[in-house]
Amino acid sequence: MSKMSEMSATIEELRKCATAINDAANWLAEQFSNFESKPEAAPAEPVLTLEAVRAVLADKSRAGFTAQIRSLLQKYGADKLSGVDPANYKALLADVEGLTDAT
């Protein structure tokens, strides 16, 4: 083999090695980016329990909002808190927090 064809073969072999190294680097980068880019789970909104809602309503009732709380319970179709659909707890609490006028 002539010097030129040996040099050409060596250059071709180096290019193949460079391509293999580049492919390996791309694969590794993809693996790490998939690992790092997983979205962090958003903190779940805490589930409102009957006891938690009852505590808030009791505080407001002691602050003089008993009549307004009764009206709000009726708004949600119940005479007492246990009759309120748990799906409405968040809205009920928002309404209770909006109470500012004690009568």
Image (cartoon, grey):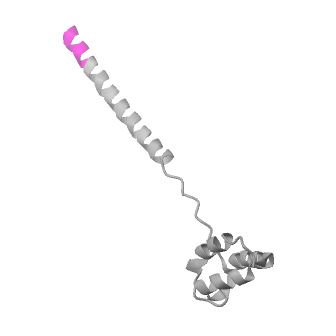
Decide: is 99 above or below 74.
above
Residue extending farthest bottom: 79
> In percent of the image, x 57 and y 78: which residue is there?
88
Q: Answer left or right for 49 relative to 40.
A: right
> In percent of the image, x 41 and y 34: which residue is there?
25
Q: Quadrant of the N terminus?
A: top left
> In percent of the image, x 61 and y 87: which residue is there?
74
Decide: is 94 above or below 61.
above
Q: Answer left or right for 66 relative to 16.
A: right
- Examine the image and state in which quarter residue 13 appears: top left
Asked if residue 75 lies in the magenta stretch, the reply is: no
Residue extending farthest right: 62
Q: Answer left or right for 10 relative to 50.
A: left
User: Looking at the image, which is closer to me, 49 or 4?
Assistant: 49
Q: Main secondary structure of the magenta part?
A: helix
Q: Quadrant of the C terminus?
A: bottom right
Q: Answer left or right for 38 relative to 103.
A: left
- Examine the image and state in which quarter residue 28 appears: top left
- Examine the image and state in which quarter residue 4 appears: top left
Q: At which x and y percent is residue 48?
A: 64, 74
Q: At which x and y percent is residue 7?
A: 25, 13
Q: Which residues are magenta?
A: 1-10
Q: Is residue 85 visible?
A: yes
Q: Is residue 84 visible?
A: no
Asked if residue 7 lies in the magenta stretch, the reply is: yes
